[in-house]
Amino acid sequence: MAKKMMYSFAEKKHSGNGFISTIMGAVSCILLLVIVYISYYERGNAGLYAGAFGITGLLFALVGFEIGLYSLTEKNIRYKYPKIGSIFCGIMFILWLGIFLLGF
């Protein structure tokens, strides 16, 4: 017996959580660039500013990754922003974790 084809005419929307995840990944990347600039400008003596921005960037990447994964489970959405946000935040989290573990 042939399988019956089912069509869905529901309009798919962009996921709000996926968009938030993408924005959080971009903020994490911007914080990394700010730290690099501050460290260069202060000739390696950034101190408290670099630590505060670093922890904030790590948390943005971690929370953005979790929100991106959660948004992949939503129904009737376009998966463009959840995929971009999850991958971008995952890469940023690994980058931040590497920076912290290596002690730069």
Image: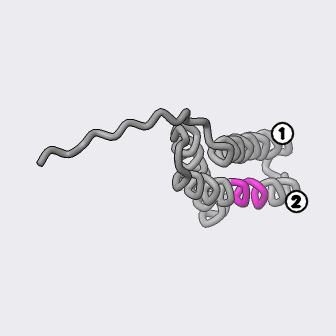
What range is drawn magenta here? 54-60
Distance between the Cα atoms at labels 2 and 1? 14 Å
- What's the residue type where badge 1 is placed? Tyr
Report x, y in % for residue 86: 56, 49
Residue type at mark 2: give it: Leu
Which residue, given by chain and number where applicable, does mark 1 sit on?
41
Q: Earlier in the sequence, mark 2 or mark 1?
A: 1
Does dot 2 land on a helix, a strand or a loop?
A: helix
Determine whether 57 is above or below 88 in the image.
below
Residue 14 belongs to magenta span: no
Which residue is at a point 61% across and 37% down the rendered structure image? 14
Task: Assign the C terminus to one quadrant of the image.
Answer: bottom right
Classified by dominant secondary structure, the portion drawn in magenta counts as helix
Is residue 22 or residue 98 the one in the foreground? 22
Q: Which mark is residue 98?
A: none
Q: Name the residue beneath numbered marker 2.
A: 48
Are the residues at dot 2 and dot 1 in contact (C-beta closer than 8 Å)?
A: no
Horizontal and vertical percent position of residue 50: 81, 54
Against 62, residue 38 (above or below) is: above
Please, what secondary structure does the residue beneath circle 1 have? helix
2 or 1: mark nearer the eye: 2
Q: Position of residue 82 (x, y in %)?
A: 56, 45
Identify which residue, 5 or 24, lies in the foreground: 5
Q: Residue at x 81, y 54 (%)?
A: 53
Residue 25 position, x and y percent, is 66, 45
